[in-house]
Image (cartoon, grey):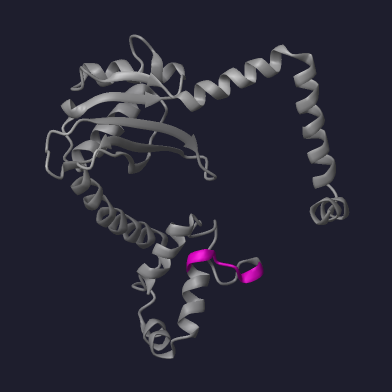
Amino acid sequence: MILSVILWLAQQGFPLRKHHEQDDYPNNNRGNFLELLQFKLEDDPEKKRWFDSLPKNSTYVSPPMQNVFIQIIADQVRPPVLQELNDGNLDRVIAICADESIDLAKREQMSLYIRFVNKKGDLVERCLALIEVPSTKAADLLEAIHASMKTSQLDKSRVIAQCYDGASNMLGKFHGMQQLIREHGSPNAIYVHCYVHRLNLVIIELAKSSTLVSKFFATIQGLAMLIGASAKRLHFFTIG
């Protein structure tokens, strides 16, 4: 039951816990994981009795244990991805895509994807890992990517392309990620600046260059703030 709750929350993209999980915390809301688990136990008296009888130091619901279960699930998801990649061709080349952002806990998280052509000839993209990194320095990101590839038993020489945003730590000619990737095991990895990111940059610069467009977006933003600040106005425009 614990695994099923964690799996459901992960599939829905919901956080498992809050900053506090104590019973006596205000509002008595201990976070999605504990509250959903308790809700399911209420429908199964036998499992609830078993759960309540467990020693308080071995209930398997502590934050560290939640992370252990998440890692177990991740370890089960990864093999099918690698099987699809290696099916019929252990030398199939890949492209890696990576991007990092700060989560709500102010920790730097990097998502790592691989793109490849499967045996059916279809171009597919699969998530390989979500990694907490100590910083956005190219060397730290490189270490995290190589560690993930080693865990997945992916040879670095199979990487023939790499795609990131246009930040200096990524596209730097001498010490950027794209250069370090080539210098450390993937000499044929062509760097591609993410086209979606490039389009976004173009749109931003176009908007800045036109007074009319700038006023348009400022007006739209002002209207959104005006409507969103009032429940009555928000209800009126939603219904209308």
Q: Quadrant of the N terminus?
A: bottom left
| Closest to the observer, 44 or 48 | 44
From the viewer's perspective, tell me whether residue 44 is left or right of residue 212: left
Quick check: 80 above or below 96? below
Provide residue 10's location: percent of width, then percent of height. Answer: 43, 58
Toward the viewer: 182 or 109?
A: 182
Is residue 118 rendered to the left or right of residue 126? left
Q: Residue 31: which quarter of the image?
A: bottom right
10 vs 158, nearest the viewer: 158
Residue 107: x %, y % from top left: 47, 40
In this rendering, would 43 be left or right of 203? Answer: left
Q: Quadrant of residue 218?
A: top right
Look at the image and give the residue range highlighted in magenta: 27-33
Give the percent coordinates (x, y) of residue 32. 52, 64
Position of 210 relative to 33 (above/below): above
Identify the residue at horizontal 30%, vertical 53% (top origin).
74
Outermost residue to the front: 120
Number of on-image labels? 0
Q: Is residue 1 above or below residue 62?
A: below
Query: Which is nearer the eye, 67 or 72?
Result: 72
View extreme (top): residue: 174
- Residue 214: where, in percent of width, then height? 76, 20
Q: Quick check: 225 left or right of 85?
A: right
Q: Within the magenta stretch, is there residue 5?
A: no
| Residue occupying the point 56% across, 72% down | 23
Which residue occupies 11% across, 38% down? 90
Residue at image location 35% in from the left, 68% down from the top = 3
